[in-house]
Image (cartoon, rainbow, N blue to C red):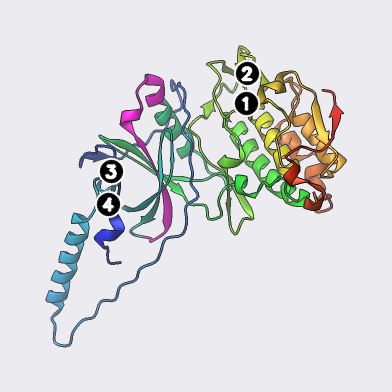
Amino acid sequence: MRINASDLTWDDDVPTSSSSASTEHSSFNSITGHATIEDAVFVPPLKSEGSMRIMRAGSSRKNMVNSRMRTASESSALLTPREKAMHGRYLIRESFAAGAYGKVCLGQDKSSLEEVAVKIVPKYILISPEEKQSVVREQVIHKGLDHPHIVKLLDIYEDDGAHYFILERADCGSLNTMITAAGIEESKCRDFFRQLLLALEYLHDNNIVHHDIKPHNVLLDDDGATVKICDFGASRAFDAHDASLPFAGIFGTVGYIAPELLEGKESYGPAIDMFSAGIMLFEMVFGYGPFYPPSACTHQDLEFPNRPKASPEVKQLLTRLLETDPSKRITAGQALGHPWITLGAGGRSAPSSLVNVSSGLPPSPTCVRR
């Protein structure tokens, strides 16, 4: 592939160094701290660019080899400092998404030509020890995960200016883009949610709490048929003996935080992910969240709207997921055996024609006391 300088423009707002080091970790121990990094691993397809080499009649093999060596040298000279930090293995094409703790860019593996997502976390914004430790913890936890419904962390690099996460690319955006005021067809909700539960069961069985389950962090791949969890910036490894973590403050995304965190309980565990998943499922089925304001989840009764219609089975599962008491909340493994998940394709859908989007008002609710 021929590399044009115009393809490699980059708004370098972070000082970098040509010196680089590839950083990998293999132990969870003694890693603590906060993290609020959000990934946007979905990136649009690269515009492919081909090149053709023509060997003129009469040219020698030596001249051809010299030409190839000059081409390789010129390509190396065109690498940006950030691409050099990744040992020239990955090319950065363009910035696609930005958050409080970094950017996500479209990238390409030079050797395989596969498209990747490159998350860049500038070091200058990591001020406190907790913020610096959070990046290390994210690398450790994410690098050790291998599941079909979790975005893969392919590589880790570091230089004086930033941390670089090379991530598997998802093709079809996040689940958030699919949620409308009418909700999502219930059979499709079931398929997506079953895949999410498989990923959560895997995480929890491996003593990991994701800590930020929400539609933005569930990506779609394979023409929108497969879901994958991303963004492990807030994740925690918990003690396998008592399956709990000590309370260290409220962090996560407003609207998806479990009651035990909002109330400042002494400890918490994987149940916080199940509550967040319940909020997400409610949004998928009904088109909006169950609690307003979000902090009302600590005391407000769960209410189901009369429209759009939803099956009794999904309502029963939502009641179990949004249980205020974490000890009574359903686990990922239990949810996978719930009748709504095992029902197959027979669930009722949520017809959009029954929702008055222009009114801006939710339908009349049916109250369920917890």
Q: Earlier in the sequence, mark 3 or mark 2?
A: 3
Callout 3: helix, strand or loop?
loop
> On the image, numbered disc 1 is attached to which residue?
257
* Nearest-to-viewer mark from 3 and 1: 3
Q: Is disc 1 surrounded by few (<14), some (14 to 19) or many (20+) residues within 10 Å?
A: many
- The residues bearing labels 3 and 1 have C-alpha atoms spaced at a distance of 35 Å
Callout 1: helix, strand or loop?
loop
Q: Earlier in the sequence, mark 4 or mark 1?
A: 4
**Front-most of residues 240 and 320:** 320
Q: Is disc 4 surrounded by few (<14), some (14 to 19) or many (20+) residues within 10 Å?
A: some
- The three-letter amino acid code for the residue at tag 2 is Leu
> On the image, numbered disc 2 is attached to which residue?
262
Residue 284 in sight from this viewpoint: yes
Q: Position of residue 249 (x, y in %)?
A: 54, 17
Q: Earlier in the sequence, mark 4 or mark 3?
A: 3
> On the image, numbered disc 4 is attached to which residue?
88
**In the shown orientation, is residue 102 left or right of residue 162?**
right
